[in-house]
Image (cartoon, helix red, strand yellow):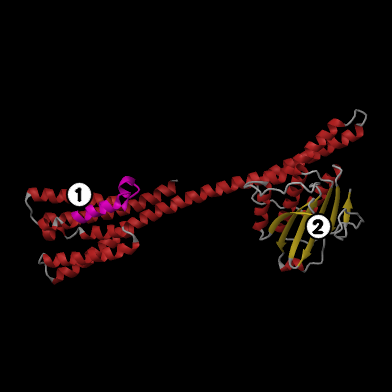
Amino acid sequence: MRSRDLALGTSSAITLAVLVAFFGVALSYLLDDRLSPARLAAGILTLILVYGVQLAHSFPHLWPWLARRRFWTFGVQILLTYLPFLTFAEAWLATPGFLAGSALLVLPPRWAWPTFAVTVASSSLLVLGSGMGRGSLWYGTVATTLTGLVVFGLSELTRLVQEAHRTRSELTRMALEAERLRFSRDLHDLLGMSLTTIAFKCELARRLPPSKHARLHQELTEILDITQQAFADVRAVSQTYRAMSLTTEVDTVFRTLRAMGIQTVFRGGAGPLPPEIETALATVLREGATNMLRHSRVGTCILHLGLEQGTVRMTLTNDGLMSRAAPRPAEPRPGSGLTNLRERVEAVEGRLSTEITEEKWFSLTVVVPVPATNQTSRRRLLWPSMDAAHPSDRGMHDSATVA
């Protein structure tokens, strides 16, 4: 705030000082003309009006109600510039420069410069009409041109400084808003699975008979572990970037689904991926599994991961839509889980899509391009091969099955 006030105050002070200097020049013209006291007083009063209108044009933020009527004030300045020539003649030759500067400040660009040129030309004609000679013609023309350009340049500089600080404040506000959005999105994406699992295990522990001490101890231990992981996730949300392991996330999802009695199948594999791509895929897997547990009656879940044609593809499919008459999912609302995931995937130049296959299987697919340096690696993340059956007939072979 202090730097903003200093920059704006400095530019405004320079502009005001120049306008005061030009006002002093115009006043000296009147004083050198040896006018009568009445005419001199009228001239000074008119000159003050000209100066006041010029201030309204140079500092429109100080008088917003005048800025909204700038064309009217410009018309008033035209009258105050040319009518006094009938009385003061050459003593009034300093005022067209103000009018030239106001033309550039007030009028639209297509009219501003032509009006500026007409104002400069008219000042030259006034010099000739006052009988000051050809030598004064050149001086008067240059003086009017420079006065107009200096008034315009300094006034525009003040406006640009004010606009720059206003833009800076808006960018700061947008950055804070984006950070708040990131924080809420990360809380939603990172804690959804943990809280869902905790709720499920608490309900399971509550229903265990008193004789199941060992099972109850196991469930409470797992609840404690998940809670500690949730605390770690909350701490990680405060960081600008949080790397996530896809392998770890697959293991976590498999353990959670197995504990809930859901048959889980893994197919394929992937090589080492850039951290940002791996984090995006891990986040999609976590949130996709959370949504599956919350919004469907899933019995079987299939995760397919593979590299194909320079991209990594991850598909999460479940049989939660058990009826052919089940409604199709509505378009995601702004701020919903799918919208957050889509934004994360698009941030790594990927795409996310959802579909219902065979009228009863819901599929979430993510496709992300992989840099060439990662495509040539021979390391692959594969789970131990185990046979598993799947109720569909699509002919896919399982790499791992957990039930």
Residue displayed at 17% across by 50% down: 46
Q: Nearer the viewer, residue 83 or 25?
A: 83
Percent position (x, y) of residue 64? Answer: 34, 46
Percent position (x, y) of residue 300? Answer: 84, 49
Q: Which residue is mark 2?
A: 304
The image quadrant of residue 312 is bottom right
Is the stretch drawn in magenta largely helix, strand or loop? Answer: helix
What kind of residue is marked 1?
Ile
* Apparent side of residue 372 relative to residue 260 in the rendered image (left or right): left
Q: Nearer the viewer, residue 372 or 189?
A: 189
Residue displayed at 74% across by 56% down: 365
The image quadrant of residue 270 is bottom right
Cα separation, mark 2 vs mark 1, equals: 81 Å
Q: Is residue 64 magenta?
A: yes
Q: Is residue 325 above or below residue 314?
A: above
Q: Nearer the viewer, residue 329 or 68?
A: 329
- Which circle marks residue 48 in the picture? 1
Segment tinted magenta in the rendering: 58-79
